[in-house]
Amino acid sequence: MSIALRCRCGQLRGQVDSRRVAARAVCYCKDCQAYGHFLGTGVLDPAGGTEVAATLPAAVRFEAGLEHLACMSLGPKGLYRWYAGCCRTPIGNTPRDPRTSYVGLVRACLDASDAQLDQELGPLRCRVETQSATAPVQSSGLNTVRAVCKIGWMLVKARLGGGYRENPFFRSGTAEPVKEVQVLSLEQRKALTR
């Protein structure tokens, strides 16, 4: 099964293989909040969280509008944070090293209803970095441990099996992102922290 990946204006489109999604979570960390403020498009939930679907980059296929894919980082060592430059829709977060085969796809780019996501990916049970939430949020305890184990196993299998080599966010066979990365200065990052 697949889930449509689509930016808000529809210029950047693709598909996500839902069978390869390891877990869904809402992250309340300060970096995800800063990224939401950078985009300025209502990405964050009322408590400052960003819903992500943890999967392999190989599960993502861009079909149209790749010229609109853009990338930023909150600092010189931070995650690569991908978005559609045409309408500032968040796409996902990847490590800087493509050998760590992970992308956290942001809910805003998944063109499916909440009920469809529950059916395809299972219910949302994991909430992380809740201490940084801007409103009271209950931690997910054991569900977080389960999610971390599933994601860890996904990463190990991709590394040992070579699946990490298939990554639409990096040039084939290199650690070079497919787009130039806008790295924010410390002052720019501080301006996004609220």
Image: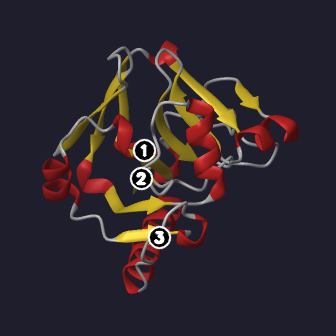
Answer with left or right where residue 124 lies relative to residue 66.
left
Crowd class of label 2 (few under 14; some 14 to 19; many from 20; radius 10 Å): many
Q: Are marks 1 and 2 in contact (CB under 8 Å)?
A: yes
Image position, residue 62 (x, y; %): 38, 26
Answer with left or right where residue 102 lies relative to residue 194.
left
Q: Amino acid at mark 1?
A: Val
Image position, residue 121 (x, y; %): 23, 58
Which residue is at 43% across, 69% downward?
127
Answer with left or right where residue 48 lies relative to residue 113.
right
Q: Amino acid at mark 2?
A: Val
Give the structural element (helix, strand or loop) at label 3.
loop
Give the alpha-carbon distance from disc 3 to disc 1, as whole Å. Answer: 22 Å
Q: Earlier in the sequence, mark 1 or mark 2?
A: 2
Give the alpha-carbon distance from disc 3 to disc 2, as whole Å. Answer: 19 Å
Which residue is at 73% across, 48% downward?
78
Q: Earlier in the sequence, mark 3 or mark 2?
A: 2
Image position, residue 92 (x, y; %): 49, 42
Above or below, comparing residue 72 to residue 52 in the picture: above
